[in-house]
């Protein structure tokens, strides 16, 4: 996973002039812009791991922007997609949102609206990525636990004391204490509250 | 066929009802006339027989005993039907047994009686018993009819009139009797007790007497009216169909207009989007601390350029909308010269694409009837399009051929390229405004060429060559040789 320096906005429009001026506008708020004239080329070459957002024109020769959107979402691309169209119909708008578009604007677009939407989309994407990373982290750590340790974690999450856990699992309180210490180390939790917050959902997932 | 059968049945029904009504009213009129005539005849005959009673009453009263008496001699003169007067002298007997017997009956009944009736000779004898002398008058029945007052023409009338007495008939007027058709009968006894004749009138109306003229006229009128109605209906249906077609045509035009408007909206929206985005970027760059003047200038230049692009779109649209009267300004133009002019203008383009166009033309000048500028514009556009198409294939495969062919009254200029050709589904649309196969193409070039060619009385057609590449054929009227 490449760690991006700053978010990149991918701008896909077949019209050179529109692309150039929108890129210039987006750069004024400090976002990097990568322009693409051919949606197919964009689909095959853009950096899917990078942080950022996608601005997509609906009307393009060869392939419709809506099809591009559907393909992106279908391939699990998580960058928020902002759709632009020259002439938007309600049906087109409905289809775009249903397919997972983050925003839908008519051209010519108001700069403030577009830039606000882009910044919101980028920060949301950053949060999504962080959450995903934390999630993946937790899963990796949880996977390191032994069978016995997972039982102990589930009982801790359920709110049992060491003594109660020992009784439930037929272990001495001392052994439970050792497992508990191992669990906290392996999961990288410092407090009981942290442990419960991060792992309660994982415990519930694996019965 | 079926529709005609319906009309035929309608005609038969209308004709039948109308014809029967006409026939019936004519029959009613004839019957009415017959009855009137019969009543008049009956009245006239009744008056005459009453006169006979009066004559006999007068004789009985005055008793003219001398055969030579003037009153007796004058009688046949006054009453032409009385052909003879007989007298039974006082205390005498009638020489004839019949008359004698009749006197007895007359005396009994106290009025005159018919002593003798001979239908063959149309005579009868009326006798009245009186005292001391009795009188009898012999009556010629044919003379009895007052023909001068008679309501019918004796020889021409179709009415048969007879007098009947005790089963014996006397025909007064023969009329015409036959079979079939209609028969009217009038029977009434004459209004004189002494002469109880029945007057029988009969009228036979034959089929031939029906008002065939009026009936045929009616049939003709009904046929004409129905034909007129049918024609009107057909006309209305035809008009509805025409209106439908017109409406469809208008819808088609509206669709084309809608598509054109949508295309135009897109073509204008793109530069406007760019203009807006550039100026907004410039404003943001200028309010920064410190302002990024260089980038802002770039943005402004971009905006200006896009504004010009928008203006070009409007200009092309206006030119496309203009329909100059090119046919009126057409003149004899040498096609080779026009092709050379266009190639001269496009020489840099040809060099860039690395193509040397080959021109295939007859040795003598080919003259077409065209507006020179429009013609060059079309050729220029066609060559330019071909060059752009050739850019899409490798340099070695590029070729461009212009060929001229002459027909009886037209000249064809064909531009062939070895480019990728036109996709078959796009072929029917290449002359539509705002339809373009090129990215960034406005889609007005070919559309304009086509309208120019049409305005000059020619055509422009597009096709793909069998092997590869597109082929555009401009056909123009040939100029009469000078």
Image (cartoon, grey):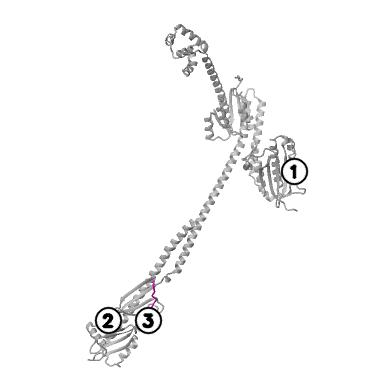
Which disc, if any, is residue B140? Answer: none
Which residue carries the number 2 mark?
B194
Residue B149 position by quadrant? bottom left
Where does the image place residue A7, in percent across and percent down from the top left? 60, 22
Among numbered discs 3 and 2, the one appearing first in the sequence: 3
Q: Nearer the viewer, residue B393 or B27?
A: B393
Q: Is residue B299 magenta?
A: no
Q: Please provide the residue range marked out in magenta.
A: B172-179
Q: Secondary structure at mark 3?
A: loop
Q: Which quadrant of the view contains residue B388?
A: top right
Comes first in the chain, label 1 or label 3? 3
**Circle 1 or circle 3, nearest the eye:** 1
In the displayed image of the protein, which residue is found farthest to the right? B363
Same chain under badges 1 and 3? The reply is yes
How many labels, in total?
3
- The residue indicated by pointer 1 is B359
**Magenta highlight on residue B174:** yes
- Crowding around mark 2 (Cα neighbors within 10 Å: few <14, some 14 to 19, many 20+) is many
Q: Residue B419 vs residue A135: left or right?
A: right
Compute the Cα span from label 2 to label 1: 132 Å
Q: Residue B33: x percent and y percent?
A: 38, 73
Are the residues at dot 3 and dot 2 in contact (C-beta closer than 8 Å)?
A: no
Image location of residue B239, percent across then percent down: 53, 53
* Residue denoted by label 3: B147
Out of A31 and B410, give the one closest to the viewer: B410
């Amino acid at each position: 996973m490449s760690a991006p320096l700053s978010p990149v906005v991918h701008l896909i429009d077949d019209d050179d002039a529109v692309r150039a001026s929108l890129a210039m506008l987006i750069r004024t708020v400090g976002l990097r812009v990568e322009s693409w004239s051919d949606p197919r080329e964009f689909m095959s070459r853009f950096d899917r791991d990078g942080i950022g957002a996608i601005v997509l024109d609906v009307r393009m020769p060869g392939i419709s922007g809506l099809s591009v959107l559907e393909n992106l979402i279908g391939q699990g691309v998580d960058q928020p997609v902002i759709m632009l169209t020259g002439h938007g119909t309600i049906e087109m708008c409905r289809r775009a949102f249903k397919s997972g578009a983050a925003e839908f604007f008519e051209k010519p677009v108001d700069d403030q609206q577009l830039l606000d939407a882009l910044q919101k989309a980028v920060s949301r994407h950053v949060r999504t990525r962080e959450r995903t990373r934390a999630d993946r982290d937790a899963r990796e750590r949880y996977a390191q636990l032994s069978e016995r340790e997972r039982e102990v974690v589930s009982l801790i999450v359920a709110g049992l004391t060491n003594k109660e856990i020992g009784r439930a699992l037929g272990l001495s309180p001392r052994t439970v204490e050792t497992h508990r210490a191992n669990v906290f180390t392996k999961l990288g939790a410092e407090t009981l509250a942290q442990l419960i917050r991060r792992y309660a959902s994982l415990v519930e997932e694996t019965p | 066929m079926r529709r005609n059968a319906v009309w035929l049945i309608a005609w038969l029904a209308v004709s039948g009802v109308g014809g029967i009504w006409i026939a019936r009213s004519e029959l009613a009129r004839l019957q009415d006339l017959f009855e009137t005539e019969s009543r008049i005849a009956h009245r006239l005959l009744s008056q005459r027989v009453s006169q006979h009673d009066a004559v006999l009453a007068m004789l009985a009263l005055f008793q003219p005993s001398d055969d030579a008496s003037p009153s007796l001699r004058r009688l046949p003169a006054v009453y032409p039907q009385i052909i003879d007067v007989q007298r039974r002298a006082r205390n005498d007997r009638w020489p004839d047994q019949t008359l004698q017997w009749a006197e007895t009956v007359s005396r009994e009944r106290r009025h005159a009686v018919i002593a003798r009736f001979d239908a063959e000779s149309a005579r009868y004898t009326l006798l009245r018993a009186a005292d001391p002398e009795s009188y009898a008058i012999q009556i010629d029945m044919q003379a009895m009819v007052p023909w001068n007052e008679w309501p019918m023409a004796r020889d021409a009338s179709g009415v048969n009139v007879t007098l009947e007495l005790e089963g014996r008939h006397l025909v007064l007027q023969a009329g015409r009797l036959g079979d079939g058709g209609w028969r009217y009968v009038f029977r009434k006894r004459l209004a004189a007790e002494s002469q109880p004749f029945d007057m029988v009138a009969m009228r036979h109306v034959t089929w031939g007497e029906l008002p065939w003229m009026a009936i045929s006229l009616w049939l003709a009128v009904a046929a004409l009216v129905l034909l007129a109605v049918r024609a009107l209906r057909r006309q209305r249906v035809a008009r509805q169909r025409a209106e439908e077609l017109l409406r469809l045509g208008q819808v088609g035009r509206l669709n084309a207009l809608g598509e054109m408007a949508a295309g135009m909206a897109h073509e204008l929206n793109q530069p406007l989007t760019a203009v807006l985005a550039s100026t907004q970027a410039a404003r943001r760059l200028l309010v920064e601390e410190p302002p990024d003047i260089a980038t802002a200038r770039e943005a402004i230049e971009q905006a200006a350029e896009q504004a010009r692009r928008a203006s070009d779109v409007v200009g092309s649209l206006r030119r496309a909308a203009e329909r100059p009267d090119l046919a009126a300004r057409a003149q004899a133009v040498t096609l080779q010269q026009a092709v050379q002019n266009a190639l001269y203008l496009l020489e840099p383009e040809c060099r860039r694409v690395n193509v040397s166009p080959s021109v295939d033309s007859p040795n003598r000048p080919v003259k077409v009837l065209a507006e020179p500028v429009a013609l060059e514009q079309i050729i220029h556009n066609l060559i330019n399009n071909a060059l752009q198409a050739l850019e899409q294939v490798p340099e070695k495969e590029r070729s461009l051929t212009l060929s001229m062919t002459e027909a009886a009254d037209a000249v064809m200029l064909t531009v062939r390229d070895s480019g990728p050709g036109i996709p078959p589904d796009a072929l029917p649309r290449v002359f539509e405004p705002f339809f373009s196969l090129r990215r960034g193409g406005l889609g007005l070039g070919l559309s304009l060429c086509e309208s120019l060619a049409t305005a000059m009385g020619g055509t422009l057609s597009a096709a793909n060559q069998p092997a590869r590449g597109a082929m555009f054929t401009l056909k123009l009227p040939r100029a009469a040789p000078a």
